[in-house]
Image: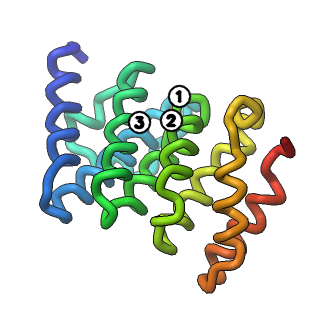
Amino acid sequence: MKRAYRLRGLASLYDQLRSDDFDRREHALFQLAMLLRHNRNDARQQVQPDYVSDSLPRDLLRLRLFTDEKQQAIGQLTRVISEYPQSRATAIWALGELEAEFALESAVASIAKIGGQLQNEAAFQACVALAGWLPANEAAFAVVDLTDMRALLRGWAGASDARLAKRAVDLLAQLPTP
């Protein structure tokens, strides 16, 4: 796909991420998550699930993201996490669709920075993303300072939301020891 088309498709998606309209922003986050999933699955030579193909317009479905474009997506998602509290859960879920080597450091920094502000669903999505990255690349966790993340997880382990508490406890047990 020509670079101009690639840039136009991504720019349009990122414009929607900056929208003040909640539904428009959430739809863009969903599409970005499906684009990231599509690229991650494509890299593993897996057949794409129908919901990925059916959820993306043709111009986005044809995109194969380069490393710099994945880094740009991380920047856009971490910006949404910090600027739009009502979209944090969706943005963290979308960030979890990236491979650990691209997203782990930025995700941990973003989540640790605002961790105390995360509501149940956003905190749960943070745990899901971290758990998804752990088996794929334990070496990536070795270079990331997880001190703040461990403190957050200990707090979430005592949450009244049983689903969040269980996920946090499980994740604490799986994280590499310092």
Instruction: From this view, report whether residue 103 is shown above or below residue 162.
Output: above
Give the labeled residue for mark 3.
Answer: 74
What residue is drawn where x is 63% and y is 50%?
A: 130
- Pointer 3 or 1: first along the chain: 1
Q: Give the alpha-carbon distance from disc 3 to disc 2, as whole Å.
A: 14 Å
For disc 2, the neighbor class at 10 Å (few under 14, some 14 to 19, many from 20) is: some
* Quadrant that contains the N terminus: top left
* Callout 2–callout 1 Cβ contact below 8 Å: yes
Give the labeled residue for mark 1.
Answer: 43
Residue 40 - label: 2
Q: Given the image, on which type of amino acid does mark 2 rest?
A: Arg
Disc 1 on helix, strand or loop?
helix
- Pointer 3 or 2: first along the chain: 2
Q: Given the image, on which type of amino acid does mark 3 rest?
A: Ile
Residue 139 point in image, percent of width and height: 76, 30
Q: Which one is closest to the eye, mark 3 or mark 2?
A: 3
Position of residue 57 in the picture relative to residue 94 (left or right): left
Position of residue 11 in the picture relative to residue 160 (left or right): left
Q: Which one is closest to the eye, mark 3 or mark 1?
A: 3
